[in-house]
Amino acid sequence: MAASPSAVLGLDVGERRVGIAVASLESKLPRPLTTLQRGEAFYDELRAIIETEAVVRLIVGLPRNLSGEATAQTQTTQAFVTELQSRIALPVELQDEALTSKQAEAELRARGKTYGKEDIDALAATYLLEDYLAGQPEEAA
């Protein structure tokens, strides 16, 4: 198990890949972790991350259009969440992911280094996790 007492995972769900970020509930500093391919091994790989990182909650990015309305990708993500909840026994919360992928791509481009779609997905997951944590009340010490 990881050294942190507990953590949350952010998932940026796409058709082929899921970007994953992690944050300790103690430090509340999210960081990109990896990108997993959706397919046969996805849930086994996700369970391994959950165990290694001592994850207690999953935060899934919910895509919407700029007006806040549901899109085809919203429905795809909701179907993913239904399956996720049937396979992983952890609380799942949805977090608006408006523009996180565009923000991630802009940051990676600004760094001036080569990057791939996997890097965008993992960084987008970091942003949605950051937004989720910013909206959580401070816990009493």
Image (cartoon, rainbow, N blue to C red):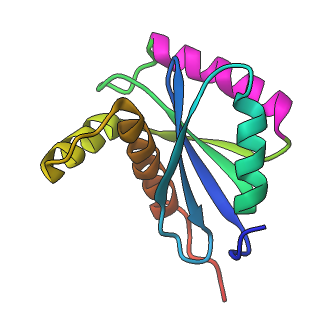
Q: Which residues are magenta?
A: 72-88
Residue at 47% over, 69% down: 29
Q: Main secondary structure of the magenta part?
A: helix
Residue at 17% over, 43% down: 109
Residue 84 on the magenta segment:
yes
Residue 93 vs 72, above or below: the answer is below
**Which x, y percent locates residue 60?**
58, 39
State which quadrant residue 42 falls in: top right
State which quadrant residue 136 falls in: bottom right
Query: Where's the N terminus, which quadrant?
Result: bottom right
Count of numbered badges drawn on the protein: 0
**Which x, y percent locates residue 16?**
52, 19
- In the depicted view, which residue is nearer to us: 59 or 2? 2
Query: Where's the C terminus, which quadrant?
Result: bottom right
**Which x, y percent locates residue 74?**
51, 20
Residue at 74% over, 20% down: 40
* Left-right relation of 139 to 1: left
Residue 107 on the magenta segment:
no
